[in-house]
Image: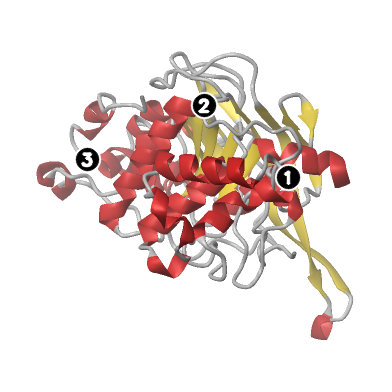
Amino acid sequence: MTPAPGGAAAGGAAAPGASAAPDASAAPGASAAPGGVGQAAVTAPGGAAAPGTSAAPGTPVGEPLLVVRDLAVHFPLPGSFGIGRSGRVVKAVDGVSLELRKGETLGLVGESGSGKTTTGRAIVRLLDPTAGSVRFDGVEIATLKGERLRRMRPRFQMIFQDPYSSLNPRMTVGGIVGEPLEIHGMGDATARRARVAELLDLVGIPGQAVNRYPHEFSGGQRQRIGVARALSLNPDLIVADEPISALDVSIRAQILKLLERLQAELGMAYLVVAHDLAAVRRISHRVAVMYLGRIVEMAPTKPLYAAPRHPYTVALLSAVPIPDPAVQRDRRRIILTGEIPNPSSPPPGCHFHTRCWLYQRLGTPERCRTEAPTLATVASAHDVACHYTDEVAGTAEALGARGPGAASGATTEAAPT
């Protein structure tokens, strides 16, 4: 069996005509009960310390489940006419550090091309890291290979973006959800059928659907099937790559509610990759903002949305609609000039300075062009990579992006529970 193009492994779906790779499934002895992970308290975000590493008060505490340090994923560019190597590389991910605890959700946001999906795929080893460390529950997995990596895979799974291409059209729903169990011989056929029925019930799919094929389901139902497959091995971590972007607006809330409920019941951690900042705000305890392969801001959800400290985050939030006509009417949209730069030749210094409204407002300071900012703590559990972060607050752009009174209202919205 061959994995789907683009990496449909680690519990992900096979491409049309291809089944999931063996690496995508359970190791012998992996737990099959959906409640086996245990109950975890998932509460509202707050604040903490240390760039990219600390838990905020009110979030799940304890030793981090996932510790990523200086993760880099580079892709070499081919030479002329596709022959050989050109000597240049695309720095899709360039020095990402983060931590994630059991029962916690970290949202990873940014424009297309910022490296979000590549980061998630490297963490679950669908892509091999070029450099850096990925420690999962104390085990370094960035360099694991073969059987040792295969035995770790059941503990970190992935939900793919497209519910249409990520399910094998030649397999029934029962076969798709039960394949990871079958690959490693977990239980007999009767036990596996019972487990599949249990998983489908958990995500709200009728048990009689086991003999139906993916094309017989709506997009939202297909994504639920993808969630059931990811849960089949009882993982501790799920990387959800744009889990609702391909769905109708009316279905998105259902999937978000499902993910929240499953986290509360099973206690797994989520790394949610998304463009939809409104959805990330609802489901995440903390949010990391990526730009051109680097994290430029990371903070608990409420403080980041109420008072962003990086000019890129301010620009992103200015594009998020607010369902209050009085507030929305007076907001100021920040239009970034140009496209995100080519990651094979990123700008020197701060990668964002070529599009930064604050850089222009401050008179194009040389430091932005020559010195790359590091991610540093500027407030409780609030980390920012910007030389002039103190200049962001109070600017017309920062105030206009939220609208009059929106900042105070943002701090009172319900957090994930």
Any mark on residue 295, and which? Answer: none
**Neighbours of disc 3 within 10 Å: few (<14), some (14-19), many (20+):** many
In the visual, does 6 lie left or right of 140?
left
Q: Amino acid at mark 2?
A: Gly
The residue tagged 1 is: 185
Q: Amino acid at mark 3?
A: Gly
Label located before the other in sequence (1 or 3):
1
Label 2 – label 1 distance at C-alpha = 21 Å
**Neighbours of disc 2 within 10 Å: few (<14), some (14-19), many (20+):** few
The residue tagged 2 is: 35
Residue 356, placed above or below residue 264: below
Residues at marks 1 and 3 touching, judged by CB atoms closer than 8 Å: no
Label located before the other in sequence (2 or 1):
2
In the visual, does 159 lie left or right of 185?
left
Residue 240 visible to the viewer: no
Helix, strand or loop at label 1? It is loop
Q: Amino acid at mark 1?
A: Gly
Any mark on residue 403, and which? Answer: 3
